[in-house]
Amino acid sequence: MNLENTKAQMRKGVLELCILNMLSEKDAYANEIIEELKKAELIVVEGTLYPLLTRLKNGGLLSYRWEESTSGPPRKYYALTELGKAALNELRQTWETLQDAVNQSINN
């Protein structure tokens, strides 16, 4: 059994929840999101984030806008849509239920 792969899959499984939650607090561009996820040890490669952001945008959960940057090219800022807010609430409820179930299972 490859434990590193299992741990990576567990982290990937909660990325959507974490990204939506992060964007519920403020709009952000990809590098900001990556830095926050790296601090939390949830992501280590940038290639994981971009397809996920695209999928969330295509699903109507995120929108984006371009903003000029004083330190380089324009940045694409992602924001939560109303559908994204509803999805976040549902994912939070699912997370709480799952967390309770896992804690009950491993603490017995």
Image (tube, grey):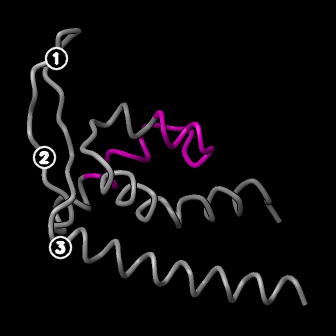
SS label for mark 3: helix
* Magenta stretch, residue numbers: 35-53
Alpha carbons under labels 2 and 1: distance apart: 15 Å
Q: Tell me the amino acid under the disc marked 3.
A: Leu
Residue hosting label 1: 69
Alpha carbons under labels 3 and 1: distance apart: 28 Å
Of marks 3 and 1, which one's residue comes earlier in the chain? 1
Residue hosting label 2: 64
Query: Alpha-carbon neighbours of circle 3 within 10 Å: few (<14), some, or many (≥20)?
Result: few
Q: Position of residue 63 (x, y in %)?
A: 13, 54
Residue hosting label 3: 83
Q: Position of residue 84 (x, y in %)?
A: 23, 68
- Tell me which corner region of the image, top left, top right, bottom left or bottom right, holds residue 43: top right
SS label for mark 1: strand
Tell me the residue at 47%/59% (across/down): 15
Picture disc at residue 95? none
Tell me the residue at 10%/20% (across/down): 68
Magenta stretch encompasses residue 64? no
SS label for mark 2: strand
**Location of the N terminus (image quadrant):** bottom right
Tell me the residue at 55%/38% (across/down): 38
Query: Alpha-carbon neighbours of circle 2 within 10 Å: few (<14), some, or many (≥20)?
Result: some
In the foreground, 105 or 85? 85
